[in-house]
Amino acid sequence: MKRIAVLTSGGDCSGMNATLRAVVRAGLVSGLEVIGIQKGYQGLIDRLYEQMSTRSVSNILQRGGTFLQSARCKEMRTAAGLKLASDNLKGMGVEGLIVIGGDGSLKGGYAIQQQGIPVIGIPASIDNDIPFTDYSLGVDTALNNIVHAVDNLKDTASSHDRTFVVETMGRSCGFLAVAAAIATGAEYSLIPEEPYNLDQICADLRNRFQEGRTNSIIMVAEGAGKAADIADQIKHRIGFETRIIVLGHYQRGGSPSVFDRILGARFGQAAVESLLKGDGGMMVGLQGADIVLTDLTKVTSSGIRPINPMLPRLANQLLA
Amino acid sequence: MKRIAVLTSGGDCSGMNATLRAVVRAGLVSGLEVIGIQKGYQGLIDRLYEQMSTRSVSNILQRGGTFLQSARCKEMRTAAGLKLASDNLKGMGVEGLIVIGGDGSLKGGYAIQQQGIPVIGIPASIDNDIPFTDYSLGVDTALNNIVHAVDNLKDTASSHDRTFVVETMGRSCGFLAVAAAIATGAEYSLIPEEPYNLDQICADLRNRFQEGRTNSIIMVAEGAGKAADIADQIKHRIGFETRIIVLGHYQRGGSPSVFDRILGARFGQAAVESLLKGDGGMMVGLQGADIVLTDLTKVTSSGIRPINPMLPRLANQLLA
Amino acid sequence: MKRIAVLTSGGDCSGMNATLRAVVRAGLVSGLEVIGIQKGYQGLIDRLYEQMSTRSVSNILQRGGTFLQSARCKEMRTAAGLKLASDNLKGMGVEGLIVIGGDGSLKGGYAIQQQGIPVIGIPASIDNDIPFTDYSLGVDTALNNIVHAVDNLKDTASSHDRTFVVETMGRSCGFLAVAAAIATGAEYSLIPEEPYNLDQICADLRNRFQEGRTNSIIMVAEGAGKAADIADQIKHRIGFETRIIVLGHYQRGGSPSVFDRILGARFGQAAVESLLKGDGGMMVGLQGADIVLTDLTKVTSSGIRPINPMLPRLANQLLA
Amino acid sequence: MKRIAVLTSGGDCSGMNATLRAVVRAGLVSGLEVIGIQKGYQGLIDRLYEQMSTRSVSNILQRGGTFLQSARCKEMRTAAGLKLASDNLKGMGVEGLIVIGGDGSLKGGYAIQQQGIPVIGIPASIDNDIPFTDYSLGVDTALNNIVHAVDNLKDTASSHDRTFVVETMGRSCGFLAVAAAIATGAEYSLIPEEPYNLDQICADLRNRFQEGRTNSIIMVAEGAGKAADIADQIKHRIGFETRIIVLGHYQRGGSPSVFDRILGARFGQAAVESLLKGDGGMMVGLQGADIVLTDLTKVTSSGIRPINPMLPRLANQLLA
């Protein structure tokens, strides 16, 4: 194996640059040439790429986002687009591809693998919705971003006896909302994986208020409801004026946490080693303390990563 | 003078605790007793207060919000409420009151002054809308909060060729939006003080896009438009998908910046010294490098602090 | 079981407050009374304690340090001191004790267990030197502190073609130094677990310089050498002027990271459940994704936690 | 005027990149060509430069350090070096030079002005030792860095009843130490501008200890003493074990604060406008709310900026 390529695809997250650095450096150390594809799969179609050197990835470790950029690519979902992408890779002399991204990006990677080019996927998704890894890249940084913002809100909440509804990312996966609830001491966390009863929450809020506990934080994953709707319903049911904040893309960026920098280093190195060993069609993942490979077919056909039931239980118990 | 009181009123901001600490310590050093009134003017009505010691204010300097809490108080707007508040102050033996808050709070302070109790106001308002001071307490921390969030968004904006509309606080005053635009290199800042032309901005966005400058940040003060509306209009006019974020109460809290800690220390000390000299009915303010006293009547009758025209000009010029 | 106690001992770290909150809330939810002992084992000797309520632990989750305080206690190493501490616990009606601290603190806990009071230990040590847990409390926050400082230094290093030697904590354990090296892209990490050759490093520095790579960071764990000595030797051997920084206690404090907040919540809850099940003489630890109990005898007799050999290898490979 | 040049010289600081961006953008908007000189005056000697475009300065606003790099340059102190530098500037067709740096750098700028090329200086020095400006570039960020570190230490100080001695930068100027003392509530600040009496401090520390106030922070500017010496003397006199931290280059870097970003924008723009108006041999400075020009001869012959006596007084009074 002489030449590999790497791309970032789908929503960006913090830690992608650290991972790119690890892929490039681990590749060069092993005597490989490493090609950086720009703008995700679109760059494969449009042949946007450059050869990477040690310098290409110096001073990027600490930056959020992805210096190779990312983009959506509809063509990749067509047979013609997929063929063009694969032919372009072969034309570049690429013998292995590393794809850093979420569920859709990994599916694209599997499709390329089917065209005969070994592909290793690296899970990157702040929602932590990808199965077969305890953590995807970007999750820990996103959590620290959320918690920083909620710590700010708590200053006001406790200064004013106020209730806040905070909406986090997470369309199908409540990991961010429930983990942030534990980490901030939020009173409630509403997640798509578990039914919740707003009547009961309202009754509880009223009881708390009567006991003098007059401020509270409700974390809600976007897949479990809109912050604005929940605030309206609380007002409608018990008359409380709540304030809302939708954290949106603020969650994605920022200098990566140590956890994400080291995870990115490990993922990147493991992906290169895996290609060198002749693997393909696999995703690297963190399971416990270990990096473990799982078939991309298994990853992309297993649905959303189930939330560890310990987390909601812990959140409920610490609410007290 | 033997005994003074202090309260925080209106929206909380970072630096209030630092100011409270300065008031208490400067008061004690001068041989005064200092009473802390809880929950703003409501606490004056309800006689919620405690005597402050050095310990009362230890380890709070670095916290956001206000440990004395703040609240709205409708009763203070009635003659009966005002009378009750003043009588309570007199009943406590209070010979001078320091009020930390925004425009409405300073008006309340002036009303109490009219009842015969000397009052010194300290301007605290993250919007920076109070006249006769270059900076109100909390502005610098709020700006740093905003800029931290926008720096995060820029990671995604530059990774994805994306346009963001970011809504800051500022109902009548665009200071936060325009200062944050300069500090983040945002391409546009829309403020209540200056008309803007969305057609022209859209034309400009399209030109930029054609030149390959495909990401941009539009800062908008809440008084100049809703982020959601502006995003809709951009989509309607030129088809660009933008992302929005409404920073809301995230802007208020957090550990105060050095600027706000020192400003709070200076304001607090100056307010105590001013009461000791026999002043009343004044607000302390920062003018250039100096602390300057202005009549509360003048402060509360002069409308919104005008934005320094240098700032919008600077923002426009650096846009390039 | 009706009443348990908790104390923090040894060097403080971020996450202790989050853990105390979890112990208190999990205890109260289970119908237990929870006693907080102040100033570590010294407070056991001196009977410094208070009963904890939900309020005792509200608004502390996000603070560094330990609100129960910690202290060294020589008396605990004497039979008389140990007896007095145990008798005091029995006198308070305490049927189980949770000890949050490092190696020495866990030994103290085992000694009390020998006196007939069930004890559960929670590993807290920013060095990550305690065996049978992947992470001790405080490690992740300390790492983020270190990396924040080194990111700052890199701004100067790359502006000035300068070499820095950065000394981290870690008397016998190089975890912080090597993990921070990976997370910052430092060129070298010197740790007590691995011999290093300063001649070779100097030769390498000179080669790098000749290739135009004129700035570098050398991380050194305190157990592997003093920053000042290493800087002197580099100057002596190859004439390079280096700058040093000894991060010291800056590493310990600060608002805990999300990882440490959740780890503290899990450790605290698991410790309470463990006492309720009748366990004693055990330490909770994180092994992979799970909380696992290990005999305190095993923990305290197994020496320093070995560093995962993957880490130095990763550091070396990414140096490129 | 068709072409100007800009360089950063001396110790780097946060905000230099924001200033460079402002110089380049303000220059381009005014129809000028802008040359960026690399590595300070050394780059003038060695003809290291490149023409700046809008892109050259995109995405650097938020970075610490200086992307043009800085360096010491002994040749500039010789007549031959100065002549070469000036001839090179003339050879490039440069009609005006903007120098961003400290005292020595401004002296160099004045020397070039004497060779017939208009020079405008921008004060950049984290010590805040340059006269005729309330703030130099980088001061506010450095202060926030210091305060962040001391906030961390206070977690440990209050958890352990411990005394810390914290050494800041400031060879002749105690601004950082005294401002940080106010902002962190440190008990003492030792600065070169004011004599201090260690006997009295020790007596005071002992009294405080006896009153139960068992932790304290002593800030010391490097020009007022070495942290290690002061700690030794305290130990020698009253037996207290103190911990020290020398903040060193950690103070310089990091993402610039909003204050420094806006100050840099204003300084940069004002410097360009000043050259366009035909000025030369001047330094821009912040005086109150205004940007004011002062003759470089006056700046470089007036010695160290005197510390505002309000600051030490404020620090002393808030100590209580």
Image (cartoon, coloured by chain):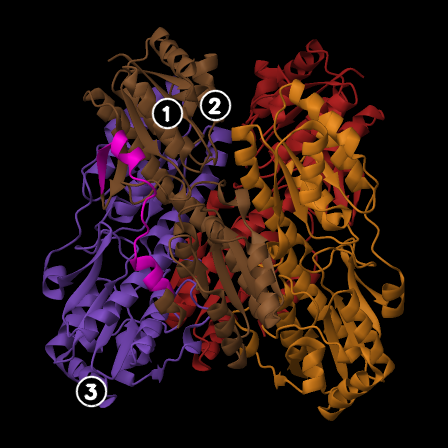
Chain colours: A red, B purple, C orange, D brown
Q: Is residue B80 above or below residue B131?
A: below
Pointer 1: residues within 10 angstroms few (<14), some, or many (20+)? many
| Residue position for label 3 | B90
Evaluate whether label 1 is on the same chain as label 2. yes
Mark 1 or mark 2: name the one nearer the start of the chain: 2
Residue type, mark 2 in image = Cys
Evaluate whether label 3 is on the same chain as label 1. no
Kindly tell me whether residue D21 is visible in this rendering. Answer: no
Q: Quadrant of residue D299?
A: top left
Give the x, y percent position of residue D59.
45, 30
Residue at x 41%, y 77% (from the top left corner): B54
Residue A211 falls inside the magenta stretch: no
Residue type, mark 1 in image = Gly
In the picture, which quadrant includes the N terminus of chain D?
top left
| Residue position for label 2 | D73
Q: Is residue C28 left or right of residue B21?
A: right
Task: Kindly indicate whether the residue at mark 1 contacts the one at mark 3 (C-beta within 8 angstroms).
Answer: no
Give the residues drawn in magenta, as a range.
D290-315
| Dot 2: chain letter | D
Give the x, y percent position of residue C292.
81, 62
Q: Quadrant of residue A80?
A: top right
Give the x, y percent position of residue A201.
50, 70
Cα distance in 3D space between marks 3 and 1: 64 Å
